[in-house]
Image: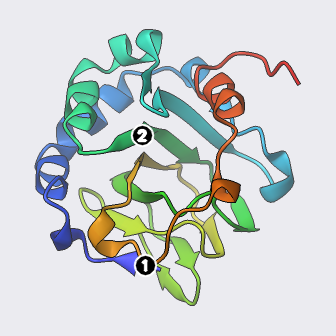
Amino acid sequence: MFFESRDFEFIAPLENNWLMVRTELEQLQPKNFIDWPEKNIYNQGWEVFGLYAFGQRLEDNCRLCPETTKLVENIPGMMSAGFSSLAPGTYIGPHFGATKAVLRCHLGLVVPDDCAIRVDKETKSWQAGKCLIFDDTYEHEAWNKSDKTRIVLLIDFKRPESILTEPISSSQGIDEEYWLNILSQTELSK
């Protein structure tokens, strides 16, 4: 389920500063990114670079992208933020997010043709400098059928109460330690 970007005040500053975000992204090295650990849902080439995880600042990474960090810190209810990269030929199979407590925003930064995301029954393509907002608890999948890498700034933020259609149950919790380890690029202890 996608939402209209215009319904969220923080979108305008993100979209107005997307070139600055892309400039900081371009200064990162491939070694700064790590493979997404849930390898059972994708075929290859999904890498991430975290800035925030569940409200906790990943200091070393934030120092590498200071202006992007300031930008995401101004998003009300921001929980997690970082870059998500899909190499050419990457396919992320159908899967579900963990909680209705957050919504996900993708700001398109490097967006070749033949890249898209399906959420529930609707498919959209990313656009450079534009945001897509969706509820990742609906089945979703993504692909990059191009010969170039696709990169977005991915942000999870608390779902505004005005669009919360049902109470959040304790069974919709998240294993924060697991995800903090992933996004801070440390080895999993499990």
Q: Looking at numbered disc 2 in the image, what kind of residue is underneath it?
A: Met
- Locate residue 137: give its quadrant: bottom right
Question: Badge 2 local density, few (<14 within 10 Å), some, or many (20+)?
Answer: many
Q: Residue 165 carries which label?
A: 1
Q: Which of 9 and 33 is in front in this view?
A: 9
Q: Nearer the viewer, mark 1 or mark 2?
A: 1
* Rendered residue at 18%/71% (across/down): 7
- Locate residue 174: give its quadrant: top right
* Rendered residue at 68%/66% (across/down): 96
- Count up the numbered dots: 2
- Provide residue 109's location: percent of width, then percent of height: 34, 49
Horizontal side of 53 relative to 40 (left or right) equals: left
- Locate residue 62: give its quadrant: top left
- Of the numbered discs 1 and 2, the one sitting upstream in the chain is 2
Question: Badge 1 local density, few (<14 within 10 Å), some, or many (20+)?
Answer: few
Q: Which of 162 and 149 is in front in this view?
A: 162
Q: Which mark is residue 79?
A: 2
* Rendered residue at 63%/34% (across/down): 176
The Cα atoms of the two marked residues, 1 and 2, are separated by 20 Å
Placement of 53 over or under 58, stated as above or below: below
- Provide residue 11's location: percent of width, then percent of height: 19, 57
Residue 111 can be seen, yes or no: no
The residue at the far bottom in this view is 121
**In which quadrant is the C terminus drawn?**
top right
Residue 9 can be seen, yes or no: yes
Q: Which of 124 and 113 is in front in this view?
A: 124
Check disc 2 and report its element: helix, strand or loop: strand
